[in-house]
Image: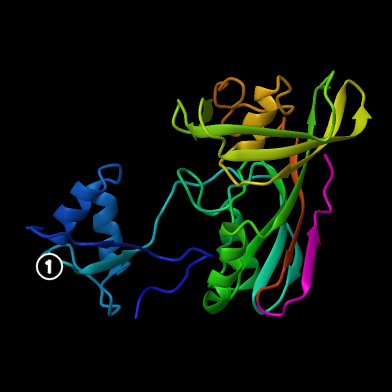
Amino acid sequence: MTLPMRDGVAPSFVILPAGCNGTLLDFLTQQFPAISRAVWQSRLARGEVVDDRGRAMQADTACRQNAKIFYYRELPPETPIPFEETILHVDAHLLVVDKPHFLPVTPTGRFLQETLLVRLRRKTGLAHLSPIHRLDRETAGVMLFSVDPASRGKYQSLFQQRAVSKMYEALADPLHDVDFPLTYRSRMVDGTPFFRMQEVPGVPNSETVITPIETRGAHVLYRLEPLTGRKHQLRLHMASLGIPIVNDAFYPQALPCKADDVSSPLKLLSRSVRFIDPLSGEARHFASRMTL
C-alpha cells in the first residue's frame, strides 16, 4: 500500500541509503535542503509521509537502511497557464492530446499542477497515464500518452525504433538559393547552458527533412520531418540554417527568461504522427487541430 494519487499527482519516494543515522526528520531535512525543516515536520504531523506499507512515519522515526518512504511534492501556488489542452482520442491503451504552448508535459521545477500529465490525470481519472515521447514546453501539438502500463513498452518501442512518422510545422524566415526538400544532418551534443544543444564536427546523429508549405507575409511556413529524435533537434537545425523559428528564446542565442510571459509562443507545432499499431496492426494517424 502507498499513498493514492492526489489532484492528479502521484506520490514521490526516496529510499533511505546505507549509513543513514538519526531520525527521519533529520534525513529529510538534509536530503532536501530546499525544503525547510518546519515543512517536513508539518507533512509528518499530517501523516503524509508513509512507508511502503502505508504506515505514517513520525518525525522521530529512526532511519532504516533501504526503507522506501513516500510523500507528496508540494509547491507554492502556481501561475495558471491560460491555454487548454484538447483530448483528440482515447482508448484502452492510448490517449492522444493537443498540447498547448507553454505547458510542460511532466512535473518539473516550479511546475506541478500546471503540467499536461497532471491536468490529464485530473480530467480523466486515469492514474496510470504516462507520456510515450517528448515534447518541449514551448512546442504545441500532438502528444501520445500510454493508458495501460502492460502495453506501454510496445508503444515506446515504436519511437525507439523510429517506426513513427512525425510531422511538424514551423514559421521562420525564407531560405533562399536552396533546393527543396532539404535534408539537413548534423552531430548534436549537450551544449551550454545545460538546457541547450549544440552542433559539433563528426558523424551526424540527427536528420531533418525541411519543405516550405506557403508564404505568410515576411515568413514561410515549413514542414519539418525529423528522421531522428534528438532534444531540440528542429529548433537547432533551423537556427543553424540561419532561419531560427519565430519566437525561439533558446536558439540561436539563449535569451533572458520570460518567466510567466506567454505573449510570444514559439511558432512550432507537432502537426501529426503516423504509425502501425503494435497491438492491432492497423495504421494509426493523429493530427493536431491547432494552427500557427
160 vs 263: above or below: below
Instruction: Indicate left or right for 223 with 232 as reference.
Output: right
Q: Residue at x 86, y 28 (%)?
A: 220
Q: Residue at x 11, y 60 (%)?
A: 18
Foreground residue, 45 or 127? 127
Membership of 70 in magenta stretch = no
**Mark 1, residue position:** 64
Tell me where residue 257 appears, x and y as whole percent. 55, 26
Total residue callouts: 1
Membership of 283 in magenta stretch = yes
Tell me where residue 10 appears, x and y as whole percent. 45, 66
| The C terminus: image quadrant | top right
Foreground residue, 291 or 33? 291
Magenta-colored span: 279-292
| The N terminus: image quadrant | bottom left
Residue type marked 1? Arg
Q: Quadrant of residue 152?
A: bottom right
Tell me where residue 233 appears, x and y as whole percent. 62, 37
Q: Element at badge 1?
A: loop
Q: In the rendered image, is residue 111 in sight? A: yes
